[in-house]
Every structure is written in structure tokens, then in C-alpha cells.
Amino acid sequence: MSDTSTFNISASSIDSWDFEADVVVAGYGIAGVSAAIEAARAGSEVLVLERSGGWGGAASMAGGFIYLGGGTPLQQALGFEDTTENMKAFMKAALGPGTDDAKIDAYCEGSVEHYNWLVDAGVVFKESFWGQPGWEPPYDDGLMYSGGENAAPFSSTIPPAPRGHVPQMSGKKTGEQGGGYMLMKPLVDTAQALGVRAEYDLRVQCLVIDQDGRVVGVGAKRYGEDVFVLARQGVVLAMGSFVYNGQMVRANAPRILGRPAASIEAHDGRAIAMGQSIGAATAHMDATEVAFFCDPQLLVRGILVNGRGQRYITEDTYPGRIGQATLFHQENQAFLVIDEAAFEEGSASETSSPELLMQPTWVAESAAELEAEMGLPAGSLQATIEQYNRFAVQGTDPLLGKNQKWVKPLQGALAAIDLRGRTGGFTLGGLQTDADSRVLHVSGAPIPGLFAAGRCTSGVCAGGYASGTSLGDGSFFGRRAGISAAQETSVQNELAAAQGGKA
Amino acid sequence: MSDTSTFNISASSIDSWDFEADVVVAGYGIAGVSAAIEAARAGSEVLVLERSGGWGGAASMAGGFIYLGGGTPLQQALGFEDTTENMKAFMKAALGPGTDDAKIDAYCEGSVEHYNWLVDAGVVFKESFWGQPGWEPPYDDGLMYSGGENAAPFSSTIPPAPRGHVPQMSGKKTGEQGGGYMLMKPLVDTAQALGVRAEYDLRVQCLVIDQDGRVVGVGAKRYGEDVFVLARQGVVLAMGSFVYNGQMVRANAPRILGRPAASIEAHDGRAIAMGQSIGAATAHMDATEVAFFCDPQLLVRGILVNGRGQRYITEDTYPGRIGQATLFHQENQAFLVIDEAAFEEGSASETSSPELLMQPTWVAESAAELEAEMGLPAGSLQATIEQYNRFAVQGTDPLLGKNQKWVKPLQGALAAIDLRGRTGGFTLGGLQTDADSRVLHVSGAPIPGLFAAGRCTSGVCAGGYASGTSLGDGSFFGRRAGISAAQETSVQNELAAAQGGKA
């Protein structure tokens, strides 16, 4: 009997199977549940293996955004025009460089259908738009801008539409049931109604490979014991990112090392390494989502400067873009400079992130004084504020194109908030899959019997990010993983029989 | 008989071996020749396989820098103090984030010995220092700053020393024998004198694996035919980067897509994919060296601004740092702004790169006029020049810390050179190896029989770069690959015998 610590083992070394099914799904988050539903609907017997004690994954802890567009019923009901082409253009521009365009095309072309699929499964989107700056709606609104579509530099070239669809929350302000939970719950209910079984407290550790190189199952640990699971049609990996694997992060995405956020510790990269152990290709292993811990209600009302006192991104864009720009391109150095009136106004505004409403780190009567207190290079912040104010009095921002409703000269007493290092996030790179969620070998050919979706794969985001793309591509390509697996021919029953398998 | 298109094949499928040796080295560039020498010295029979018609690889086309320090005889003879600790500190600061510190420690601790090893092998370093701004010495000087050690932000915290060691060139200005050739020639002579054999026009395509998972040879293509080579002790992969593999670049390092430079077309990533096909881990696949096509004699005398008209890196640092900062952090947008007097002076200065002495793209009488002609945001360049001049009159550069010898106010007629997109380079990521050049599986364990060095591996550079680190770690860890391979026990001779191998 082989042990499960080696990432992949030969089927011939397995004495008996502890469980079996047509399609075995590893991980019961958004990608896993979506795969399970579609495989079950296609007639396959489905077993989901989950390392924790219950379903949910990172998805159930998330805000719940799903990035959808091209004219969803919700967008239409709320009066927003969107087209598949505009959605494609935005995603390719904002989520690169190096986007997988075949994947984005499929995702955009299938977006309205995917919305309807979610609704049919019981997910509720309230016909209500939230238009304030923020990370997510504070109440149960169903739609919000979540990628910077309506900010520079995109808004002037690609007609913007909000695409952040949020399942209607219940008691969010009191922490009861957030959008991620309200997304997962009906999907899991749907899966269960379709007969999908689940085994919990079972940590998938390795792939089982037959003599032809086909993936025919997985090995796992349960309470210290090895468990083997036969997958007659295919295995779907849906085990999340690698952000909690320090070694992988250091070797691939070192800037996010030590700053995981919006993730769960189960995201240890095991699925990626399992795939790699049999020659799977990976993509964009350096890419990460980056949260920026400052309330957008403050951000839009000030100017954000780097360690050289220079502005570098429009303050009214999606705060995740600000996080990426700061962590990746400004050495994680950022300061928000704001005047007293704007600070008061921002602090008093309705916000979804009260914990991110911060107090000034420094206050001063002049730019020169503030700059010195902050330790910025002499003259740097002074020049930046002069330049900003010169045009702000006319309500314009030629440097970065901030929307004029947020452009006002900085006047009177000035404050600055120290935002250095206030970033965190999760990894976006992973196994390379095709648009049918088949895991690709480095040769470019699909690996027989192996499918994957969610954050253990490289999805629609190659470099950039928009809120909702992870639950979005996890669910969209999770479904395709389930469909693809259910189309496989069943491995010879003799395999199980010859090895004394139990059903 | 198996074909060689599958990245790895089973030894049992091979009918006969066409060649055999104790240590088989794939690629006859700097890493390959270094591995061959050390394996031969350790008593192994060595065969080098090279896809082109002769030895040399990218190394023989290169300028020839080898990054060495810690007090080499050349540094000492030229009066430069250096220590192993300072070298380590600089490399970890400048070549990150995410450096492999075990590798850098070994590299720095072995640097003086490595210098002596090169000299003993016949490499000549002339006792002459080149101190002008530039990419490389114009003549046959042996030492130069090649990483920005003597520029901000490093020079103030880590005592600088030049570490770019250049083999003495012969007739370089007339293109006869550059530093890279003068490095490779004596090493190849040394290898040949040790009995190292080579086979040319033979393209290595796959690894041959025995039933225990040990690498015991390679498969290759020669004039359309499959060729199999038995490696009794081990295989050393030294086949270069993946910068000419568009698919791999797009998936891993998209910013360098379409802009290979300082490389050769043989760098197609095959060695990396061969390793990946048997579960090898990779690291820093997004990292690239970036050349910046503008003469440093002009750069230091002007101010370099991004697409927002802001300065972003001190103009007197290593130009490869400028290239990386521009391509990775400024969206490949750069302009050099310079006044007439400085332009004349720079153009008249002794340079190693006459082809990079460019003419102004725009000229104007004022910053406002120039900014408008360049299409920069209104007010941006004006603010930058005002800020620069305000301190330049005192000979200081508080923003970026340019050396005061290059700091002068911009006066009179102004010119700007369009440097957008003037970058190119090669990839730095690749197979993960340990400090003994053993290729590591995703499990963290060495893969039996497989060793690698040079640009098909991730070496001392995780994110940053200094000239000489590629030939440096290629030769240093190439040697270790040869030593490690020569320490392996020989595979059972019966393997060859059973399969009717010919010697």
C-alpha cells in the first residue's frame, strides 16, 4: 500500500478503494460545488471531498461578488447598458498583461447564461445599485462597480457598466449571512438535491494515475489514515490558491509573502503541486489579488502618493487596482494626503468598511511641513500638491483623470494617513487549463482524467483583478470542469474489481 | 521505439542507445562547459550535446560580464575593497524580492575561488577599471560597476564595489572577439583537454526515466531522426532560457513578450518543460532581465520621466535597473529630458554604445511647450523640472539621490528623447535547483539523476538583475552541477546491456 505523501501514485499500488464515484471533486468551495452540480446533471455519480468539516471554502467567507455582464437581467433592470464586446474589451485591458483570451471570450459570451444559471439554482440578486465608493455594498444591494470600469483610464475608451453582482445578503451589517454564504448555500442545496455526496475532514494529497497516465482517483488523509478514492470518469481539482504555502509564495509571488488576506489556510497549493507532479503547466504564478486597507470614502477625497511623494493612480478607481499598483509598482509605499474638510466629509459618509476609516498619522499647516514630518524627499509633496491644486481649482485632473466630482483643491490644514504596507491578498496563478477546464500538460495536451477550476488554476486574471472574477471564473469554469469530466468514458470496472475495490 | 516528442519517456521503451557517457550535458554554453569541466575533473566520462553546429550558446555572443566579488584579486589589484558580506547584502537587496538566499550565500562565499578557477582555466582579466557610465567597457578593461552598487539607493547603505569582471577582449570595437567569446574559448579548450566529447546538431527533446524515476538519459532529434543517449551518472540541463517560446512567455512573463534581446533563438524553454514534465518545481517565471536602449552617457545627464512626466529612478544607476523599472513598473513608458548643453556633452563622451546615442525626438524652448509636444499631462513635466531645478542649483537630488556630479539644472533649450518601448531582454525564471544544482521536485526532494544550471534554472536573480549574474551563476552553479552529477553512482550496466546498447 502506497502512502499519499508523494503527490501522485500508481493505481497498481492501491490495494483497495475506500470510496468511488464517476466524478470526484476535491474541494467544496465555489468551483467544487459548481462542478458537482453540472456533473450530476449530466448523469454522473458525484462525490465531493472536503478537508474541513463542512462546505463553503473561501467563497462562503467572501463578500460574494460575481463578475458578470454583457447585459444580465440585473444590469438591464437597473438601467445599465452592457455588451459582450465591451465586457471582453475591459477584461482584456484591465486583467492583463497576458490574459488567456480564449477563456475571457468564453466567460463573457456565457455570462448572461451563467447569471440565469445562478438564479435558477436559487441565488437571489436584489434589483438595487450601490454607487458609492467602497469595497462592497454595505447593505443588500445587488450591483456595484467592482473593477474600475467607470474610472480612468478605462472609462474614456470602453463604455463602462457595473458588473459586480452580489447575492442578496441577510443581516450583513450584523455579520449574519454575507454575500458569499448566500451564494454558496443555494448552490450546495442544489447539489444535494441532485444526489451529490460529500465526505468531510478528508485532505486530498495525491493523484492516482493508471498505467496509461490517466488520472483515475485521489489519495487523501483522514484522521492520519490513507484513504483512496476511485474516480471512474475524472477528478476535478477545486482546492484553492497557494497563498498559505510560504515556500511556493516565496518562489513565485514573493511580494505577497507574509500578507495573505481574503483567503483561508486551506489554500496551501497542494492541488497545484499535485498537478505539477504529473507535468501540468502553470501560468501567472506571480499574479495576486491585492486588497488595500483604507476606506475608499477617504481615498477618493484625497490624493494618494508614493514614497517619492508622487501620485500614481487615480484615487477613485477600484481599490484593488490601487492595492496592486501599490504593492507591485510602488514597493508597498503609499500615503493618503487629505485636507481637513475632505477628511471630515469622507469619515461621515456612508461606508461599507467602518473598520477602514482611519485617523490621520500626521497633521500640518503646510505642504512643506507635512512633507518633512512624513519623511518624504524635500520638495516632493509640495510639487505634487501645487500641481494638483493648479488644475483642481478648475475641477480637472489632467495627470490621472480622477472624476471631477472628487476633484477639489487641498486647502487649509493638511493630514496624511500612513498606508505603507497596508496591503494583503491571495494568489491568482495556478494550473493551466483550457476553456473546457481540462488541465494542460506542458506539452499543451490535456491530461486525461484531470480537470480543475477556481484559484488552483490561472483563470481570467493574468495580472490585474476585479472583485468577482474569482467567484466568477471559479463558478463558470467549475461548471465546465464538471461537464467535461462527465463526458469522459468510465475507466474499466475491472480496475476496481482486480484490486478488490469496495463500492 | 518511443519518439522524443513527449518530454519524457521510459528507458524500457528504448531499443538501443546511440551514445553514452557517465555525465551527459545538454547545451554547450557557459553552464554546460562549466559542468563538463568539473565532471571530467572528477573522473567522469562527459558528453556534451549541442543543438547548433558549435559550442558557445548565448554566452559567446554576450559582453562577457561575470559578477564576482568579495575581494577578488582583480578588485584588490585595482584598489577596490569588497567583502563577502557586502556582496551578499547587495545581491539580496538588489536581485529580489524573493531571492534564494542559500544560493546567494554559496555564490558569494565561493566567488574568489570561482575567479581563480576561471583564471586557472585560461580566462584573462586585464587590470584596468572602466568608470564611465555605460553598459560595458568600450575597450578591454577588466572591471566595471554592473549592478548599480555605486548609485542610490544602495550606495548609502552597502559599501559599493565594482563586481562586473570582463574577460579581456580582443579587437572588440571591430567586432572580432568580445568578452563572452573570450570567456568561452578557454573554458571549451579546458574541457577538450580533459577529454570532454561533444556532439553537435543534436536537439535534446526529452528525458529518459528508469522504472525508479531516475533520469538515465535523454532523447534528441538529429536531422529528423530520434537519438537516445544514456547518462550513466546523470544529466545536466544547460539549455538556456524560455524567452523565444512565445507561449511560455505569454503565460509566465507577458511583459517581455515580443521583445527578446541579448539571447538566442535556441532559448525555447525545452529544458524547463522537460523538467516540469516529471514534476520539477519552477521559480520566478515572471522575472526578466531588461535592457534599456539608450546610451547611459545621455541618461546620466538628463532626467528620465514616465508617462506621467514623473521621475522614477535615478538616472545614474545600472541601466538594466532602469530597464526593469520602466518595463515592469512604468508600463514601458519613458522619456529622457535633457538640455542642449548636456545633450552635446553626452553625445561627445566616450561611449561603449555608439548605436545607442540617439537624436532628440522633440525640442522646445520651455518645459510647458515641450510637455505639450510630448503629449504629457498638462503641468506634469513643468512640475518635475521645477522641482528638479530647485535642488539641482545646489547640486542635490533629494528625490532620487543621483550622484551630484551628474546633477545640474536643466537650462535653455530643452530636448526629449522618446524611449517608450525601448526595452528588451531574456527570462530569468526556470527550474528550481538547490545550491548543489540538483533539480528539485515539487515535493522539495531532488530528482535523482537530474541537474541543471544557467538560464533554464532560477538562479541568483529573483526579480532584479545585475550584468554578469547570468554568466556568473551559469558558470558557478554549472560547475556544481558537474560535481554533483559526477558523485552519483553509475546506473546498472545491465540496463544498457539488456537493451542492446552500443558504446
Image: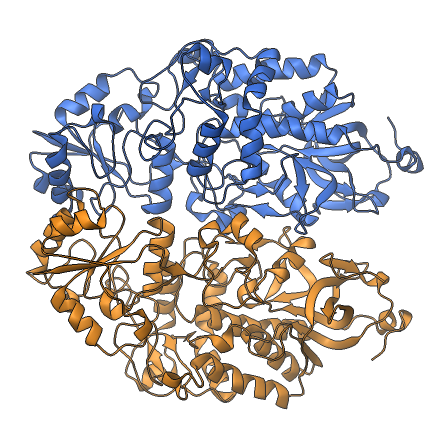
Chain colours: A orange, B blue
Q: Residue at x 74, y 37 (%)?
A: B218
**In this rendering, position of residue A137 left or right of residue B345:** right
Q: Vertical placement of A80 versus A304: above or below?
A: below
State which quadrant residue A343 falls in: bottom left
Whole-percent x, y for residue A391 in the image: 9, 56
Name the quarter where the N terminus of chain B is drawn: top right
Q: Vertical placement of B246 versus B69: above or below?
A: below
Whole-percent x, y for residue B23 in the image: 75, 28
Q: Residue at x 19, y 66 (%)?
A: A301
Q: Vertical placement of A30 versus B141: above or below?
A: below
Whole-percent x, y for residue A378 in the image: 17, 42
State which quadrant residue B159 falls in: top left
* Total numbered badges shown on the rendered structure: 0
**In this rendering, position of residue B292 left or right of residue B310:** right
Residue B26 visible (yes or no): no
**In this rendering, position of residue B480 left or right of residue A376:** right
| Front-lying residue, A270 or A118 | A270
Whole-percent x, y for residue A277 in the image: 68, 54
Q: Residue at x 66, y 29 (%)?
A: B480
Residue B99 visible (yes or no): yes
Name the quarter where the C terminus of chain B is drawn: top right
| Front-lying residue, A112 or B149 | B149
